[in-house]
Amino acid sequence: MDSVAAQTPAGSPAVGAPAERREGREKVTGRARYAAEHPLPGRAYGWPVAASVARGRVRSLDTSGALEQPGVLTVLTPADAPRPAEPDDPTLRVLQDDRVPHHGWFVALVVGESLEAARAGAAAVRVEYAAEEHDVLLTADHPAAYTPERANGGNAGRRLRGDPEAAFAAAATRVDVSYRVPPLHNHPMEPHTSTAHWDGDRLRVYASTQGATTVRATLAALFELPEERITVTAEHVGGGFGSKGTPRPDVVLATMATLRTGRPVTVAIPRRMLPAATGHRAPTLHRLRLGSGPDGRLAGLLHEVTTYTSRVKEFTEQAAVPARVMYAVPHSLTEHRVVPLDVPTPSWMRAPGEAPGMYALESAMDELATALNRDPVELRIANEPDAEPDSGKPFSSRHLVECLREGARRFGWSARDPRPGTRREGALLIGTGVAAATYPVLVAPSAASAEALPDGTFVVRINATDIGTGARTILAQVAADALGVPLERVRSEVGSTDLPPAPLAGGSSGSSSWGWAVHQACAELAARLAEHSGRVPEGGLRTLADTKGTADAESPYARHAFGAHFAEVAVDTATGETRVRRLLGVFAAGRILNARTARSQLVGGMTMGLGMALTEGSTTDPVFGDFAESDLAAYHVPSHADVPDVEAHWLDEEDPHTNPMGSKGIGEIGIVGSAAAVGNAVHHATGVRFRELPLTPDRVLTGLRAARR
Amino acid sequence: MKPFAYLRAGSVEEAVDAHAAHPGARYLGGGTNLIDLMKLEVERPPVLIDVSRLPLEGVRELPEGGLWAGATVRNSDLAAHPAVRDRYPALSEALLAGASGQLRNVATTGGNLLQRTRCPYFQDVTKPCNKREPGSGCGALEGVHRDHAVFGHSRHCVATHPSDMAVALAALDARVELYGTEGRRTVPVAEFHRLPGEHPERDTEIRPGELITGVVLPAATAGLPSAYRKARDRASYAFALASVAAVLEVADGVVRRAGIAFGGVAHRPWRARRAEEALVGAAPTEDAFEHAVDLELAAASPLRDNAFKVPLTRGLALDVLTRLAPRTASPA
């Protein structure tokens, strides 16, 4: 491993340097404390009881057996749980009535002296259900499907430009295909966890969340406490991938339990309950119609997505949205249809919308390239738009063509023989594929403070959350440059609502949103110091910035990051086993703030895309209405052996229209398009087009055999 | 947690006596499966008898040329043992194809044989499962069963046995060495696990209180070409969708001995006797292998969603057999 000095050379900027994570040593030595690891005297543990029917009511709930268990303190049930105010998010309305809207919905919480006692108590709770017939299966022609006004992210449910049906019908070359992406699960290493306790009249909560500010606001509203009397700490968070972007039931349950017992209570949602209780990526059924002229330029594009939501609330995976951004096309329809079913509530998962949407769009582009006998890189370049197709806004920067060209060069694309199914190594068929990536530049207002201390050091304070991304380190880098001081003289404090409020770590917006406020606070402090004569006073000098009104100002530009993925795969014709040999991505994502942590994020995203392509996915059990794969032995994230060679590169892109750092966000774009690149490589390897993920041996072998006949 | 007593046995006899004295007790080896199942309340033993430190360690040469591997030998150690790698490569390959490095460092030979199915209905106490709770029904039969059996299942149970090691042992004609109140006995690995029939709650032929003390690898298959191959959803740490272990002896251009077992397709390692019989006496050609394997696969009866296992097993079996055949006998 290459070693990088903690110090930056005098005069060179801190931003962009591969600075090591400041908490790295704490994490690898186990000293970093996560939400369940704060030792508190008298701490008790909660274990939820999850519904075992997919729809119905709790007819009776007998807690006597649980209460007889040694160490069980209490059982919270819908009959007697505290009654918080009505939450904005109905998934947080836990233990308030006897309705069971889906399998895995929490019907009780057992609180015990130990995790083991609580767990044994939960097993001893006897629940009888009045089960009702359930409907958990998503079909493209489900009679309950409707077009929502808004898909997730505030995106229009349906957008129509021109007459795409007619344009498609009249096109010289047409691709009309359907793809299926299964339910996917976030499964962060650290499960959703909260420890709540009273400190006098102050509610203190250690939460595993991507945004402590929202957790505090939610708790204040639910439990009718002023925000000033609540502290939510999220010092270290073991991943979230979107599923900790909003408060989850653990924090409500822990708070109710501490209200009930007067003791500190930790609720860590057990691994096997995560799929149903904490959100997942809903399955998406895609119909893609692409019509082009003989020159390959798109004449009509129709991307129609059918997905599901729960009975609890409407959440529509915005999978048709990237088609509004990607390619020049005069006529287009992008529409979502959503079916409410008796299923767990879907929610955000890394690149919601873009990850499944770009799998479908970029697979269809590959199919069009095949139909036209065009190189898939060149086909994409031929469809490069001058402005954002759907809005007509100019791009603040794009550079997709440059990503494709640079990726092709690095990957050795020019040597590629386009004929599918022709490269054999014994039983293996080898192929390569390409796909584009895009993710919007999102940014939200934030506050931050900066302080100069008499000893010549500086502290920036902001309630940012470091979910494993390196936020702590990156914000110090931004501050160092804005202050014009070496990085090692800047300390950053993050992860507590006692710090200036900041938005969540989500939507690839964290570093841009927080960095903007930190930059502003530090620039103001630098100006103050320039005016100030003499030593910094004993009490320090402090500035407070708030980017409200600037960070959220409407931009005249369409702002997105772009990228290109290249994949090489080997498909075993005897077994259908498909393994990736190489994955290479090139990204145009504005200024990269930390070369080391950015690379980790991009490689992580690409690896998650590899998983989406080949190994990840869960099965809705039609009989019981739950997910058949509920732990990490059954839900297959890629193992190390699946990830042989992943390279992430980026262009030195300058975009003056995003924020003072010129950053765009990199947390999600790595997963966008990578699954399509792998799928396209499988087609190139085998000559067979697979349109349902993941590409497991059962599907691939069956497809290969069908093609041979 | 359901309270349980923990005893550490000092000798095999002590372990067996303790078991006889404590109805419902379970022997504890590496605990990589039993402890998980206790957390899920699938297993609720009142007493655990720790046998992991019994003097059943090591791999020993047997006088007539075979090997004895102790019940407490860790999977990693067994896989890495020079005599195993040299004389029974299929066993080493099978062990290394199983679980993860961390699990193999803990899991024992005896425990590996006695691990339970990973059927999701078996692991979820809110679901029906005849293996866990006789008479409650089989959730997998009409449920999610891509990973389940295609051979020898019954309407009571369609689960598979998850071990890789046992598949290789079955093909190699290994025997399980048992000790119980009635003394010592050995059982062929291929007959140690049962088919579910009417009693899927009984995984094996082990008698109440009997303890696995080791496995015996016979001289007859020592040094013969053998191999194991497994197909799975990801490159590591996944159970077999299907697997094949085979040992092949060819002399004078004719197959003298064939041991073939399929994994991931039945309630036990599926010894492919029909295929073996068809091969013995035949020339080891691709045609002969195809004919033999197809004879065996004709007995498969896939469920609604796992028909792919039949061609998958075929692909694996042909690959393994072709690899084992002398090159001169199967011209490319």
Image (spheres, coloured by chain):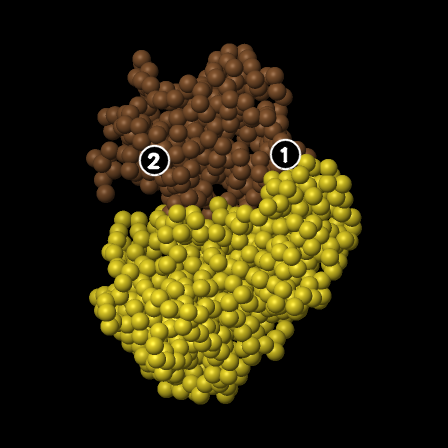
Chain colours: A yellow, B brown
Q: Is residue B216 above or below residue A491?
A: above
Q: Is residue A450 left or right of residue A113?
A: left
Rendered image quadrant of residue A649: bottom left
Q: Is residue B127 left or right of residue B194?
A: right
> Label 1, on which residue?
B2
Q: Residues within 10 Å of mark 2 (few under 14, many from 20)?
A: many
Q: Is residue B78 above or below residue A496?
A: above
Q: Earlier in the sequence, mark 2 or mark 1?
A: 1
Residue B93 disc label? 2
Q: Which residue is rendered at x = 56% and y = 15% of the image?
A: B17
Q: Which residue is rendered at x = 56% and y = 44% of the image?
A: B120
Q: Amino acid at mark 2?
A: Glu
- Viewer-closest of A575 and A674: A674
- Viewer-closest of B71 and A653: A653
- Viewer-closest of A459 and A65: A459
Q: Which residue is rendered at x = 55% and y = 41% of the image?
A: B119
Chain ID at mark 1: B
Q: Please tell me whether mark 2 sits on a helix, a strand or a loop.
A: helix
What x and y, as percent, mark residue A581? Answer: 30, 55
What x and y, as percent, mark residue A318? Answer: 53, 72
Q: Is residue A658 above or below residue A350?
A: below
The answer to whether the residues at label 2 and label 1 have Cβ atoms under 8 Å apart is no
What x and y, as percent, mark residue A633? Answer: 48, 45
Q: Is residue B14 above or below residue A656?
A: above
Chain ID at mark 2: B
Q: Amino acid at mark 1?
A: Lys
Q: Which residue is rendered at x = 39% and y = 31% of the image?
A: B75
Q: Please tell me whether mark 1 sits on a helix, a strand or a loop.
A: loop
